[in-house]
Amino acid sequence: MRKRLPAAMVAAGAMAGVMGVSAPGAEAAPAPQYRLVLGSATTLEYRGINARGDIIGLGTDPSSQGREKGFILKAGSKTPVFLNAPGSGSNLREETRALSINDQGMVVGRYGKVVVFPGGVAEVPRPVLWPGPGGTGTDLGVNPAGTAEALGINNKQQIVGTQGGIAGTPWSEQGSTVTNLPLFPGGKTGEALAVNGNGVVVGDAAQADGSKAAAEWVDGKISSLGTLNGGSSAEALAINTAGQAVGDALPPGAPPTLPHAVLYQGGKAIDLDVPGTGRNAARASAINSHGDVVGEDGVIPPLDLVGSGNGFLYRNGHATELNTLIAPTPNVRLAEATGINDAGHIVGIAAVTARDGSQSSVGYELVPIT
């Protein structure tokens, strides 16, 4: 399983009313225009946004000598609150990652627990909950003697994640009860990556033949969300309350480095045909209750050090690059979009080029212009 920062799902308690997601190629309605709001210099990326506009991300904490930490940016604030590891206060050695946020502002993710052993020191990934509004988290206690991370949370405080590293086991926690989720017959690994307001969990799991299928767990039972025309690998990264899931998948014969952004519907993966599909990796990272999808397309400018495709919005059957939906902004490229809420606010990672040619990343928010 590839290592990445899983996309934070849209707040799982979103309204249940849904506009259906049109198939690619349907007649397009005009895409909305947006006002760009860049994060401060300490924000490296935005990873998710909830219904009230709170944003989570990753940044460099000045109080911890610039160590990378997760943060929460309260709606209307310009100052990120960095999230500390359990019991560490401002421990300089332990990094944190904020990976999902619900509408109450509760955040889950992982931290690197410092473990000292003869001859060295290591950081072991552990699952953590930041209940808000404070900056110090609580270890969730999953797989206490090993590794684990929390990847999704809904408004009922149901948390999902993966434990055990490469040979991962998906799990769900409600209150203090942890339940390991089943795998496909003959499969040995899986990841629970997101959960919606109805408790439906999505992610991926290995099948008996070694392929990886996008998976869904309902009432503790696993089923496949399908593949892209029979391809060998698929995963679901986010799900809305209506049960529409998005992620990425490989078509038959494609190299493992070139997945396509997909929507899971009707037992199969539907290719969203985003710009640059097949040229570089693409994925759909988040979906709101209206069926609007955002993610990363396959267009990466040459010599770009951020290394992510352009952000896209998929709406009414068409994918549009986000860079075309804002006023021209020199030296700023809207790379991967990682979250969208029901108000249509989009967050992600921007590539910024300085006058001397150096590049850096910073979080961005797009606010719809009405």
Image: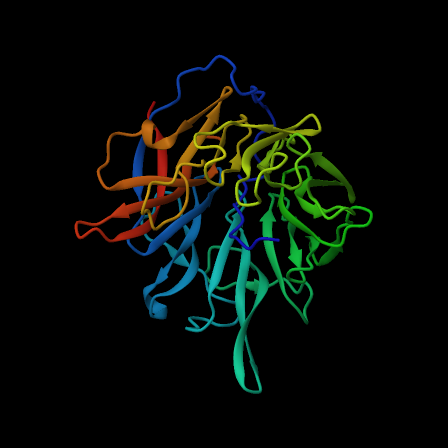
Q: Is residue 9 left or right of 182 when viewed as pictured?
A: left
User: How far across and how far down the image is residue 320, in percent?
Assistant: 41, 26
Is 216 or 52 nearer to us in this picture? 216
User: How far across and how far down the image is residue 121, in percent?
Assistant: 52, 79
Q: How is the image coloured?
A: rainbow
Is 97 drawn above or below residue 185 in the view shown? below
Is 324 drawn above or below residue 231 in the view shown? above
Q: Is residue 276 left or right of 301 when viewed as pictured?
A: right
Q: Is residue 310 left or right of 114 when viewed as pictured?
A: left
Residue 199 visible within the image: no
**The C terminus lies in which quarter of the figure?**
top left
Is 108 drawn above or below residue 334 in the view shown? below
Residue at the farthest top position: 27
Q: Is residue 200 left or right of 286 when viewed as pictured?
A: right
Residue 317 visible within the image: yes
Is 177 or 365 nearer to us in this picture? 365
User: How far across and how far down the image is residue 140, in percent?
Assistant: 63, 62
Residue at the farthest right position: 185
Is 234 drawn above or below residue 328 in the view shown? below
User: How far across and how far down the image is residue 89, in percent?
Assistant: 45, 71
Residue at the farthest left position: 355
Q: How many marks?
A: 0
- Residue shown at 38% from the left, 23% from the top: 32
Query: Residue 275 is drawn in which quadrant?
Result: top left
- Residue shown at 57% from the left, 65% from the top: 125
Residue at the farthest front position: 253
